[in-house]
Amino acid sequence: MALEPELFDALIDTVRRFVAERLRPLEAEVEAADAIPEHLVEEMKALGLFGLSIAEEHGGLGLDMVEEARVAIELGRTTPAFRSAFGTNVGIGSQGLVIAGTPEQKAHWLPKIARGAIITSFALTEPDVGSDSGSVKTRAVRDGDVYRLSGTKRYITNADKAQLFTVMARTGEEAGGRGVSAFLVPRDLPGVSIGAPEQKMGQKGARVADVIFDDVPVPVANRLGDEGEGFRIAMQVLDRGRLHIAAVCVGVAERLIADCVAYASERRQFGKPIAEHQLIQAMLADSKTEALAARALVLETAAAKDAGANTTMEAAAAKYFASEMVGRVADRAVQIFGGAGYIADYGIERLYRDVRLFRIYEGTSQIQQLIIARETLKRGG
Ligand SMILES: Cc1cc2nc3c(=O)[nH]c(=O)nc-3n(C[C@H](O)[C@H](O)[C@H](O)COP(=O)(O)OP(=O)(O)OC[C@H]3O[C@@H](n4cnc5c(N)ncnc54)[C@H](O)[C@@H]3O)c2cc1C
């Protein structure tokens, strides 16, 4: 436990009430505006949500992975876009710095990230480079005390608000990930520009855009780790990020199941609540079983990670299973709601669209399968 048990229980209780009382009532508004109201972002900062995973010495709450997963499950009980407001600060935007930053880099950036004074983003994907992320084409060419950074990053979450990017760029001639280095790139360096936010299928309020680097002079002091270590750092960042995403999937599934129970208990057909029809019960049973299985997998993997185990395979399995699971749960939820499941007012179709992303970002389901198979073969079972 990183936090005292009573403090952690109080945090969970506060987050649960924040989700129920402050976030859930604004889900439709956020969907319509494709933006999270600034006053809510300020409340998230006050709760410490931007620094969940950052050490206390740097101004964060210093949660361990089990605690972070439990908070992420609570946050999953509302539209996932809310979590995205601070998700990159807690996860992929900050963890490269946490894993590989120098004491000076950490002292300079982490306190600002932890209190939400700046937003960070993680920039790996490019127009021609997605799943094959070791083949990045963005280049960083050493020129005295700086690297000259040029290239385009695509679908970067929170790019429009970020003041700091963790950027993976090619510094060497070695093929694949071995030639890739990681850099901390402030938004205000000359030559950094941001594209227009993309129109997305779901998770409205969480915005993605291109980030374009045009001969940007990045100080050598902003490199994370040694030259050639960037891909390894990115993969470690994703190991943790995948577990966090899996936990969010569990939370959304639990929310959908609760919505289904409430609706099926009220809605009457053939003279009784539809919850009393066994074919409805079968769908509820399947959803509940799968959500319980995903919760157990996430928390067991988080505990193993906290104990220092290599959880690359288990984190990929958790993300694969939980993201596919919540897709099935959302599909059954639409079915249980019937026509209402397809109508925007009930919010089920919105969550159905929202959860589709979980099978794609931070590595598609196919990439998780490849990781699980590779690690299983390596471990001999
Ligand atoms: C809303 C959103 C937010 C995102 N946020 C970020 C972010 O903050 N930072 C960032 O760097 N990226 C981000 N991404 C990018 C995301 O991680 C990629 O979209 C994802 O990794 C897939 O890459 P791709 O889109 O290029 O698909 P592709 O790699 O082109 O894949 C297309 C299809 O081919 C399959 N495929 C690819 N290779 C194989 C293989 N070897 N075997 C079998 N099947 C394969 C894939 O599984 C997929 O089904 C975001 C994307 C979205 C949509």
Image (cartoon, grey):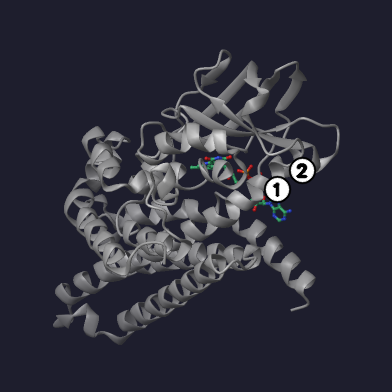
**Residue 356 can be seen in this image:** yes
Q: Which mark is residue 232?
A: 1
Badge 1 vs badge 2, beta-carbon distance below 8 Å = yes
Amino acid bearing label 1: Arg
Q: Nearer the viewer, residue 89 or 318?
A: 89
Q: Position of residue 119 (x, y in %)?
A: 42, 33
Look at 45% across and 49% down and name the residue there: 55
Could you tell which of marks 1 and 2 lies nearer the N-terminus? Answer: 2
| Quarter in which the N terminus is drawn | bottom left
Amino acid bearing label 2: Gly
| Residue at the far top in the pictured view | 190
**Residue 157 can be seen in this image:** no
**Above-or-below relation of 105 to 130:** above
Q: Which residue is mark 2?
A: 177
Q: Secondary structure at mark 1?
A: helix
| Front tag of 1 and 2 | 1
Q: Position of residue 95 (x, y in %)?
A: 54, 46
Q: Position of residue 188 (x, y in %)?
A: 50, 18
Task: Residue 132: name its quadrant.
Answer: top right
Using residue 122 as the reference point, say whether residue 89 is left or right of it.
left
